[in-house]
Image (tube, grey):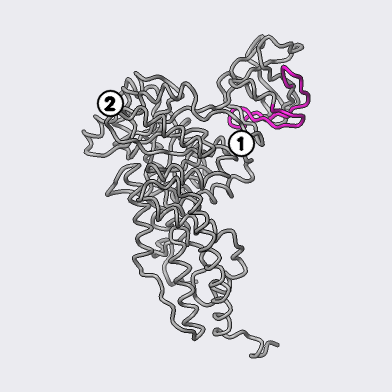
Amino acid sequence: MIVASEIPSTTGTARRLHGQLAAIRTALRAEAEATLAAWEPALERAAFRSSARNLADYLALRSVDLRPLQDDLLALGLSSLGRCEAHVGPSLDAVISVLAALAGMAPEPGPAPADFERAQQVIAARRDALFGPRSDGPETRVMVTLPTEAAENPDLIRRLIAAGADCVRINCAHDGPEAWQAMVGHTRAAAREAGREIRVAMDLGGPKVRIERIEAEKKPRLFRGDRFLLAKTPDADAGGRVLATLSHPQLIDHLRADSEIWIDDGKIGARVIERAPSHAVLEVTSARDKGVKLKPEKGVNLPGVDIDIPALTAADLAALDTVMQHADIVGFSFVQTPEDVRDLIAAMEERREERDLPALMLKIETQLAVRNLPRLIVQAGGALPVAVMIARGDLAVEIGLERMSEIQEELLWLCEAAQVPVVWATQVLDGLLKEGHASRAEATDAAMSQRAECVMLNKGAYLPEAVQMLRGILGRMDRHQSKKMARLGPLGSWRARQEL
């Protein structure tokens, strides 16, 4: 039996929580100031300073375990701080102010409603500036990846814009300057015809590690248990096994016994079982039962290996000559360090001529990029408008599928704290794009993508249809969700009173 004396009073609970949160706020401010001081050299753009401060506040707040306080805050009818990303300081001040009132303490001034509205307005304005404004349809913008065909078929781009695309993406790892220029020209013309502002994003290919050559009598199909060689040169002694070379052969020196390697977006998993100066012998540990063909140009991921390769390749620098003439956004593939960002901005400055520099889109594809994300955002955002792409294909292979859901959530939170737009990318509605039919899992994934400011679709035969379906899903989800907050509009599937 519970007696009244055992039930903590509202006043006592409020006083205790007030003391705990006030102490957290004091420590947070000191830590955030120190972080901002370290970031100061990068903060050249006044428009980004308040965002950097909020990011510093968020990092300081999330260094504390708030879970023991959250249930008690909810029991008092207060915010649990679970949706404070975009406005950390005002959220904390609001809760502390109400706790002071509930505890009968001296009044503490709370934040103004405008402090909360301003944060959302900043993110929305940056979304529109980077990915295009819209007065109709879903809040989340749709980016489409143009296939080679788009260089010679302007009608395809017209169809994509008519279906609802907001931004086109040109992958500079493929095709060439003439094709890129044709795609941009067709896009600008189609946008004028439609009376729309369609942004052009151009991705630099970056130092993606790929299979370069295959030495085998015929196209090899690998099964679990098969062994093959990764060699520095194609003339290594393969002992009758399949031999493959890498685009960056020096990486073989970083492999050790039991190192994991994933090929072709994780379709082939292998483990190093033997190392020699010129090669590594690998055993396939993961593949479909019917096997997987090992092909040139397929990507290679080496989880746990910090790939010490310059983020800007010679091909990227050559592509920049064209990119700087046409792009609204430059996609930075395999960016990992603030130095990488500085190098790209310097290369862009050399080619800027009379125009403003385009925005940057940081593509997060490695474990090191995840660890460095706050510094990457500040380095880029302190100089230029910036967005972050969660490149889930390479990233999932790098960190493991088991962690992917967790990490993509954390990346969304961190970017909202930095008030930076996010692009949700890789294999969205992939079945529909390639085969004309989406799976249930893909539809659910597309619904989750609504919490980002933009969603990217890859190339595929059914790209216009995928744009239409994606916009329909995003529009429906807008009724129910805004970032982490559920929107409680009336439900239409049930009447309020149901008779049995």
Q: Is residue 413 left or right of residue 487?
A: right
Image height check: is 82 above or below 247? below
Q: Residue at x 25, y 39 (%)?
A: 196
Could you tell me which secondary element the residue under label 1 belongs to? helix
Asked which quadrant contains residue 51, the reply is bottom left
Image height check: is 490 above or below 158? below
Alpha-carbon span between mark 1 and mark 2: 36 Å
Q: Residue at x 25, y 31 (%)?
A: 190
Residue 40 screen position, x and y as percent: 45, 50
Residue 181 can be seen in this image: yes
- Please give the residue where the numbered disc 2 appears in the rendered image: 185
Image height check: is 198 above or below 472? above
Residue 462 can be seen in this image: no
Magenta stretch, residue numbers: 254-280
Q: Which amino acid, mark 1?
A: Val
Q: If the image is split into quadrants, where does the N terminus sit?
A: bottom right
* Label 1 Cα neighbours within 10 Å, binned few <14 / some 14-19 / many ≥20: many
Image height check: is 73 above or below 378? below
Specify whether residue 263 is painted magenta: yes
Q: Which amino acid, mark 2?
A: Gly
Specify whether residue 72 is painted magenta: no
Asked which quadrant contains residue 460, the reply is top left
Return the residue nearer the eye: 252 or 74. Answer: 252
Asked which quadrant contains residue 458, the reply is top left
* Label 2 Cα neighbours within 10 Å, binned few <14 / some 14-19 / many ≥20: some
Q: Is residue 79 left or right of residue 161?
A: right
Which of the two discs, 1 and 2, labels the residue nearer the N terminus? Answer: 2
Q: Residue at x 46, y 77 (%)?
A: 98
Residue 324 screen position, x and y as percent: 34, 28
Could you tell me which secondary element the residue under label 2 belongs to? helix
Residue 337 screen position, x and y as percent: 53, 38
- Please give the residue where the numbered disc 1 appears in the rendered image: 397
